[in-house]
């Protein structure tokens, strides 16, 4: 029994052949998401220990110890970095949610109804991402305001914090 095989298209594997089957990116962009789920157990429990599904918020920020300008800077910078990272992750989650929910058919059969419903739901998650991005901006602004408001106190002790200068060699003295 002989089977007839069709010759591939223009490419070696038919990748250059344009057909309705290959043109899937007309409405939904093609993208790949890689998720690495590395779970390690350290044996720590209690506040600050990573729970199921990721680390806890307590581990993202240092202790709120504002006893020096360096500690204020460290806290504000850690908050800014954590909020920015979270805003990026939440924004990605909003896009993924919109893509997944838009595949659910509209119960009334309206054209673009599934995408409209998905957009309404994902918009709330996108607002959360925007709020986290604003929190990152405000954390940076907090340290800037601290520097401006306490400039006199910072400058008063800044000269004491500097290392003493190394003695210079006087080459004229021989």
Image (spheres, rainbow, N blue to C red):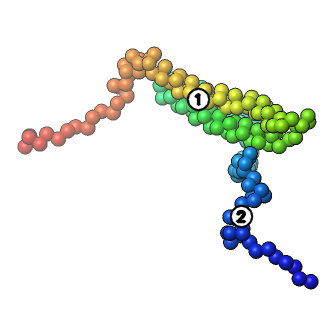
Based on the displayed image, in which of its 4 quarters is residue 101 positioned?
A: top right
Secondary structure beneath label 2: loop
Based on the displayed image, in which of its 4 quarters is residue 61 positioned?
A: top right
Classify residue 101 as left or right of residue 9: right
Which residue shows up at 37% across the image and 19% down it?
156
Q: Is residue 32 above or below residue 58?
A: below
Outermost residue, bottom direction?
1
28 or 111: which is nearer to us? 111
Q: Quadrant of the N terminus?
A: bottom right
Which residue shows up at 68% across the image and 72% down it?
12
Q: Which residue is mark 2?
A: 17
x, y (%) of residue 165? 27, 34
Q: Which residue is mark 1?
A: 136
x, y (%) of residue 62? 60, 32
Total marks shown come to 2
Classify residue 23 as left or right of residue 107: left
Q: Is residue 63 visible?
A: no
Q: Is residue 17 visible?
A: yes
Q: Earlier in the sequence, mark 2 or mark 1?
A: 2
Secondary structure beneath label 1: helix
102 or 63: which is nearer to us? 102
The residue carrying pointer 1 sits among few (fewer than 14), some (14 to 19) or many (20 or more) residues within 10 Å by Cα, namely many
Based on the displayed image, in which of its 4 quarters is residue 167 positioned?
A: top left
């Amino acid at each position: 029994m002989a089977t007839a095989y069709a010759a591939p298209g223009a490419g070696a594997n038919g990748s250059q052949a344009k057909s309705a089957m290959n043109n899937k990116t007309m409405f939904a962009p093609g993208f790949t998401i890689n998720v690495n789920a590395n779970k390690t157990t350290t044996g720590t429990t209690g506040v600050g220990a990573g729970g199921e599904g990721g680390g806890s918020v307590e581990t993202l920020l240092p202790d709120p110890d504002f006893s020096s300008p360096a500690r204020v800077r460290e806290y504000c910078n850690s908050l800014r970095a954590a909020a920015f990272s979270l805003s990026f992750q939440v924004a990605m989650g909003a896009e993924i949610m919109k893509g997944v929910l838009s595949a659910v058919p509209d119960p009334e059969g309206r054209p673009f109804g599934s995408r409209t419903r998905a957009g309404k739901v994902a918009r709330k998650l996108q607002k959360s991402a925007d709020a986290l991005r604003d929190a990152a901006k405000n954390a940076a602004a907090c340290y800037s305001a601290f520097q401006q408001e306490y400039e006199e106190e910072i400058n008063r002790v800044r000269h004491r914090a500097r290392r003493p200068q190394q003695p210079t060699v006087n080459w004229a003295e021989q």
